[in-house]
Image (cartoon, rainbow, N blue to C red):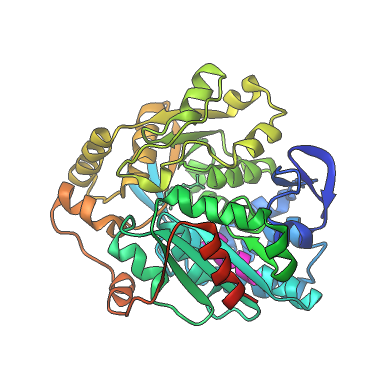
Amino acid sequence: MIFYSTENKNNKVTLSQAVIQGLADDKGLFMPEKIKALPASFFENISSMSFQEMAFEVAKNFFGEDIPEEALKDIVYDTLSFDTPLVKVNENIHSLELFHGPTLAFKDVGGRFMARILRYLLNEEKENVNVLVATSGDTGSAVANGFYEVDGIKVFVLYPKGKVSNLQEKQFTTLGQNITALEIDGTFDDCQALVKEAFMDQDLKSRHKLTSANSINVARFLPQAFYYFHAWAQLSAEEKAKEVVVSVPSGNLGNITAGIIAQQMGLPIHRFIAANNENDVVYEYIQTGEYKPRRSVETIANAMDVGAPSNFARVLDLYQHDHKKITAILEGARYSDQEIREIILRVAKDHNYICDPHGATGFASLETALKEDQVGIFLETAHPAKFNETMEDILGDIEIPEKLKAFLNKEKKSIALSNQYNDFKTLIDQIAF
Ligand SMILES: *Cc1c(COP(=O)(O)O)cnc(C)c1O
């Protein structure tokens, strides 16, 4: 498969280049040249296939030309070592629970897949690589756990000191081995700026092979299409005959873009909703046609605190930059912190279901948007216990799953660094491949 840059369709690369490079050299995002529709037989059989079998069929569409079947099958099966069950919340709304993986968030799917495909591609090219990732919480844990003990890859997780929760911090500072946690004396923006500067530093890059693992990477965002198929497969025959609306709690838009790609492969999704918190640039674009990126503000759905969504360029590209075409399929919604708190409380009371602050925006947007006879699915993007302080404020004590508790009992290991680029560079020179 050939991938092109959203900045220039003539700037084309192979799968291996797209994955190892991350971002195109013209700063565009890579897009698959073809989005092939799956055959009718696939949709006829979908409900009798396992999640892994179905995902393998989807994966072949994008990666089958470049990776032999057996190797690709191993990558897909190994990635999906957990399920994404569809759980009924009320009469016509279901929750797609994406939090049954190692770090209890949907990013596990992309993180695990990317680590495995990168290892495969590096073995082909006999190379080692360093992954740099800046995190405000969830990305760091999914990437660190996805890449943990993968040969030939060292991961550096940069995070702002004192600004991630204890639970989140433990998920990427306790692993050790090929994972190095860097506690930066600064903000998340400082962490991101250090990573960006490293990618532009030709001197550093002449000594070390560097790549990124955020959702701009095709190997992280495309596999997220898998669970949209699995969600639809779990609907009853009666529900499958209805119009299906999918709501995605959105930040950088990687998740929803993968859903749109699933739809373009033939998955019968009627409409998508991009649910925002107070960081509502996408909502505003949908309403007005004007895209005005800005600084993000802090909210209780903090994984969606994004002021300039990195995958917006992909959405524009998929619809030829046409606002009319985009709004024909995509609508927006926005919720304040106060509204999110009320939704969580109400859903717990009325439906005996616990939404996390991100999923809550998805549920509420469906309540508002669904027409009679439509079925709604929202993506429950993380386990509520990951946000235990917020959740306890709203609902009182909540249960922490064993998987999370296990991280809490381990010892934090991290390297403290200033937010000065030279300190970061010196450290990379000392310990990177
Ligand atoms: C990352 C994240 C999001 C946002 O996903 P995007 O792909 O960036 O739109 C939503 N919810 C949770 C819990 C997340 O970790």
Q: Position of residue 293 (x, y in %)?
A: 52, 30
In-front residue for pair 285/328: 285
In the visual, does 305 lie left or right of 23?
left
Q: Report which quarter residue 175 is drawn in.
A: bottom left
In-front residue for pair 421/362: 421
Look at the magenta stretch and give its main secondary structure. helix
Residue furthest out toward the left: 396
Quadrant holding the N terminus: bottom right
Measuring 33% from the left and 42% from the top, which residue is drawn there? 360
Q: Report which quarter residue 408 is drawn in.
A: bottom left
Q: Position of residue 153 (x, y in %)?
A: 62, 75
Measuring 41% from the left and 35% from the top, which residue is drawn there? 276
Q: Position of residue 417 (x, y in %)?
A: 43, 65
Measuring 41% from the left and 27% from the top, which residue is drawn there? 369
In-front residue for pair 40/311: 311
Residue 50 visible in image: no
Q: Which residues are magenta?
A: 109-116
Quadrant holding the C terminus: bottom right
How many badges with numbers are in the image? Answer: 0
Residue furthest out toward the top: 288
Q: Position of residue 304 (x, y in %)?
A: 42, 43
Q: In the figure, 295 relative to 176: above or below?
A: above
Q: Specify whether residue 113 is painted magenta.
A: yes
In-front residue for pair 127/387: 127
Q: Specify whether residue 132 is painted magenta.
A: no
In the visual, does 405 lie left or right of 33?
left
Residue 259 visible in image: yes
Q: In the figure, 405 relative to 241: above or below?
A: below
